Image (cartoon, coloured by chain):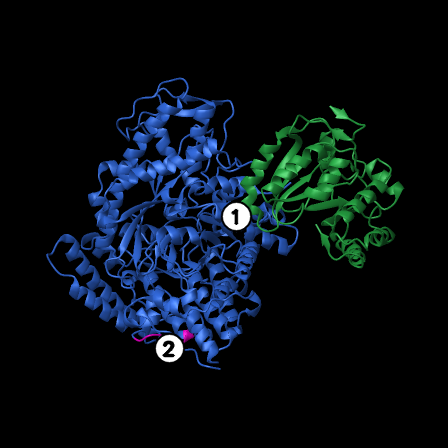
Chain colours: A green, B blue
Amino acid sequence: MLNINNCHIKNLDNTLRVHSIESFGTHDGPGIRMVVFLQGCKLKCLYCHNPDTIQTSGGTEYQIEELVGMALKMKPYFGKKGGVTVSGGEPLLQSKELVPFFKRLKEEGIHTNIDTNGRVLNHFTKELLDEYADLVMLDIKHMTEDGYEFLTGMRNKETTFTFAKHREASGKAMWLRYVLIPDITNKPELLHAMGQYFKDYKTIEKIEIQPYHKLGIHKWETLGWEYQLKDARENTEEEINAASEILKNYFKEVKIN
Amino acid sequence: MEVKQLKSGVWTESVNVRDFVFNNITPYHGTHDFLVGPSERTQRLWEICKEATQEERQNNGVRSVDTETISTVSAFEAGYIDKENEVIVGLQTDELLKRTMKPFGGFKVVQKALSEQGLEPNKSLTNLFSKYVKTHNDGVFDAYTSEIKKFRSLGFLTGLPDNYARGRIIGDYRRVALYGINFLIESKKADLENITGPMSDAVIRLREEVAEQIKALKEMIELGAKYDLDLARPAQNAQEAVQWTYMAYLAAVKSQDGAAMSLGNVSTFLDIFIEKDLEEGLITEVEAQEYIDQFVMKLRMVRHLRMGAYDEIFAGDPTWVTEAIGGMLADGRSKVTKTSFRFLNTLYNLGPSPEPNITILWSESLPQNFKDYCAKVSIDTSSIQFENDNLMRENRGSDDYGIACCVSYQELGKSIQFFGARTNLAKTLLLALNGGRCEFTGQQVVDGIPEYTDEYLDFDKVMANFKIAMKEVARVYNDSMNIIHYMHDKYYYEKAQMALIDTNPSINLAYGIAGLSIVADSLSAIKHAKVKPIRNEEGLTVDFKIEGEFPCYGNDDDRVDLLARQAVADFNNELKQLPVYKNAEPTMSVLTITSNVSYGKKTGATPDGRAHGIPFAPGANPMHGRDKNGAIASLNSVSKIDYKDSLDGISNTFSIVPKSLGSSEQDRIDNLATTLDGYFSRNAQHLNVNVLNKETLLDAMENPGEYPQLTIRVSGYAVNFVRLTKEQQMEVITRSFHESM
């Protein structure tokens, strides 16, 4: 089922492999959104709160037209801001199938958004970034290579930055997302480093801080996996605010999600 | 500054408040930034009220009762909360929260309600009512057939207004402020002069009614005089306009104790007087808000004497002082004024509250600032509800309407409605499966339905039987309504309210159904899965075994949603065939009150897998927990019920946890306003919104003392959560709370 070399999940024609669908998503992009959580991810982030989306097997095949039909039923509630978000898992593992899906959504006048870790930059992804994705929410895991590997189990954080550069070149909107974990990602030097790196990007409208929480632990246990961040704690309000103050030096808008 | 002149029009010559509003309204498009907090006087009064309501709660829900006096428009001397701080005066009696006897609906009910408090009525009254004076209740039971009594006692027809007042009639209380009572009397006298022979029943009755109305108007002048107010003349300024309007409403709730006594649509009207005084520099925003705060405070203190059994049906001691706010005028201007905001602001100045039952007439075209403020108030207080203004205005014809009771359109001053209570449609479906017999007692209720003996239920056969059952239930329901409204007019005529309505108004008879989601899911199970009835020795269904899957109403799935839509259309069509007293137009609502608990008890197991005793879902809601595809799918299913088949309203109660609406306050406001736009763009009619965490409700059950004002929308109205019984509280908690992952 999985073709590792292409970094891509093979699907039946015109289908997407879906983990679950949220019909009233209010935390994954602007406004009210249909959020399609796609199955499969190459990373295994220690804090992942949807670990059941990681395995590339499983999920349910949905016809693209079926998903478009669902989006159309929700369209009256999207208003001026809302639309469809693909999240995951890592949605771009299915970038080839996302192209016709997003194309159809654009035909229907629906706002499109990809919530991604930015590790897949094949020509389908580029087509999505350049043409069909109204918004990209790029997850910045960590600003150091060791930190990145510790959190995600993979090396080569640079791919994320290459991805960001490509989106910047397209001139289309981008949000950054950053999971804030005390002592791991919530350190002033890391926050400054991120700010310095992205401060001249013109397409970044805002950065969303996602304070670390332990809500996903029981899902790890259900999967029979060990939760390795057990000792991490949640941020205090002061810690969140301090991080937010640092980031405000570099970004137009800092939002705590 | 130039002094604002009122623009004349048709209203100057004849009674026509709508024309006055239309010509003089100042629509407001700004934000809520102009609003002010409560005045010191208001705060002092509210402290007294809060203490009194706490005493009431501690004293089994009743603070005091007058057992000597029959309450009429002018029966009691003036009463005050704290006279020197009151800018708007008037209580139902001479004392705050004192309940009174209004025995013309039924004397036995008064006796029962008093005896539950360890009291009894004055001996001479008991003597009078047991020997000489006939009541509405007496009249109805003289005329009831044994068939109607059977339908009533077995629970096919529920909450019939046959031993209490029917309510729902909204007097156009604005008329007293705009015209003064002398003008209204003259106008009614002229009408009476023109009601001439030949003297048919209808003509004689109308002459008597108008004569009664004139007496009520004279009594209102007396009522005003007790408070040193000259209601005979029009209001001269904003304070008087509020005061006069309240006095007119007070006359209604002094003389009638209908379940629902709506206020109408007064805020926009009052704004014209307030704007004028503000422009002339006579008052500031502080006084403007003070009038509205104190008016609303008085509305919150309205009480009726009720017996315990009544509270089982209408939980939480509601009075439905429903005030409709917002909406659009026929010419495309908005009816939103600063006073619309001031009314909503009372929910901050005095805290959340179920009464008055504030209902936003929502249109996509309302000013965005107002929409955002409504969303904010809803999120902060869970005290308000929303109805589709475009849908009602376009289908029903007027832009000057109020909401009768929970959700029903009623043109102000031009039409009234007869309250039709409800029939239990889920129980009606069980008749279809049991050869027309009651599922509990085996009594034959409906004839002509063949005994059903197949091992599995067949959809077509069930539908054929269900249609016979609906036709028969509709017939008996209609019979009961005709008797009830005939007798109510005869023995407990609403002369004070009717005095403020055009002579001979149009009427609709507001029938209702409960149990729609159970019917839809049951039919879906029968159609899409295999349903095997378990029958007892008498052949009555006691349970159902379902093999296979079936779609449930509430998931935006046409396979079942269209069954719901069709059931509404079918029953409405049956009702429409039947002639109604006073040539009223039959209409229908899909609405339950909190009686979902008692409906559950009175309805056996149903083919959808619901066990006997499980409460119904409120109104047109999907059954608790069965709407699994999220909030939008749930809303979409309800929006498929056609308003044309249910012109009195289709109630939907929507509960969502705050976090699921968005992560910041601004997001939550945007998302709620957008949701309302979306829902109503699909021609849905009504939405109750609760933005609450279940944990809050559970905590309030444990620690009621800490949540005296916790308000929750139930079905077309709101209640103080802590005033519900444990059982009713649990029913509310098991409802679907939409939550994102």
Of labels 2 and 1, earlier in sequence is 2
Q: Which residues are magenta?
A: B233-239
Marked residue chain, label 2: B
Q: Is residue B285 visible?
A: yes
* Residue drawn at 55 percent across, 61 percent down: B369
Q: Which residue is identified by label 1?
A: B678
Horizontally, is B220 left or right of B526 in the view?
A: left
B235 in the magenta segment: yes
Q: Which mark is residue B541?
A: none
**Label 2 is placed on what type of residue?**
Gln
In the image, is residue B374 above or below residue B547? below
Give the number of callouts.
Answer: 2
Within 10 angstroms of label 2, few (less than 14), some, or many (20 or more) residues? few
Q: Nearer the viewer, residue B630 or B147?
A: B630
Looking at the picture, tell me which residue is in the foreground, B718 or B49.
B718
Dividing the image into 4 quarters, which one contains the N terminus of chain A?
top right
Locate residue A186, reporting x and y percent: 82, 50
- In percent of width and height, residue B184 lies at 27, 69
Residue B483 image offset from top left, x and y in percent: 23, 46
* Distance from the alpha carbon under mark 2 to that under mark 1: 43 Å
Compared across the picture, whether B146 is left or right of B48 comes to left
Residue B155 in sight from this viewpoint: no
Type of amino acid at the residue the image marks with label 1: Gly
The label on residue B236 is 2
| Residue at the spot 51% in from the left edge and 66% down from the top edge | B47
The quarter holding residue B245 reads bottom left
